[in-house]
Image (cartoon, grey):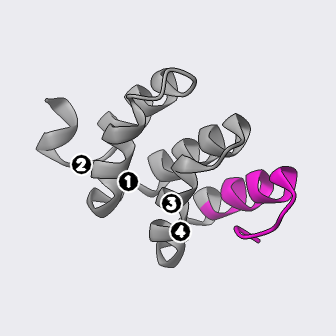
Amino acid sequence: RLTDKDAKVRTTALTAYGQIRGAEGAARMAELLKDPEVDVRRAALAALAELKSPATLPAVLAAANDTTVRFEAQTAAPATPDKRALA
């Protein structure tokens, strides 16, 4: 449940989406890059790295401006098969 009030539930849901390549949830996963909980943002980046969706790359690149998840964003971006990830 990506919209659950409990951050642990959101984090677990993101992990599951990433593992099953839940493309239908890609936009919602990208929205969670702005979640107030850092663990949720980290899980969102990990799930998006697994998903490898060029559509979410702008959100992943923007997340690199967040110092608490910069490393994860810089790891997730190159996982996407898109030339913009290498800029």
Which structural element holds mark 3? Answer: helix
Please tell me whether residue 8 belongs to the stretch shown in magenta.
yes
Q: In this rendered view, identify the residue nearer to me: 59 or 82.
A: 59
Q: Amino acid at mark 4?
A: Arg
- Callout 3 environment at 10 Å: few (<14), some (14 to 19), or many (20+)? some
User: In this rendering, is residue 48 above or below 69?
Assistant: below
What is the crowding at mark 2: few (fewer than 14 residues within 10 Å), some, or many (at least 20)? few
Identify the disc placed on residue 31: 3
Q: Earlier in the sequence, mark 2 or mark 4?
A: 4
Residue 3 lies in the magenta stretch: yes
Q: Which residues are magenta?
A: 1-17
Q: Position of residue 81 (x, y in %)?
A: 24, 48
Residue at the spot of label 2? 81
Which of pointers 1 and 2 lies earlier in the amino acid sequence?
Answer: 1
Residue plotted at (46% across, 57% down): 51
Q: Quadrant of residue 62?
A: top left
* Residue 52: assigned label: 1
Is disc 1 in contact with disc 2, using a CB cutoff of under 8 Å?
yes
Which residue is pictured at 76% across the width and 58% down the height? 10
Please tell me whether mark 1 sits on a helix, a strand or a loop.
Answer: loop
Mark 3–mark 2 distance (CA, rounded to whole Å): 20 Å
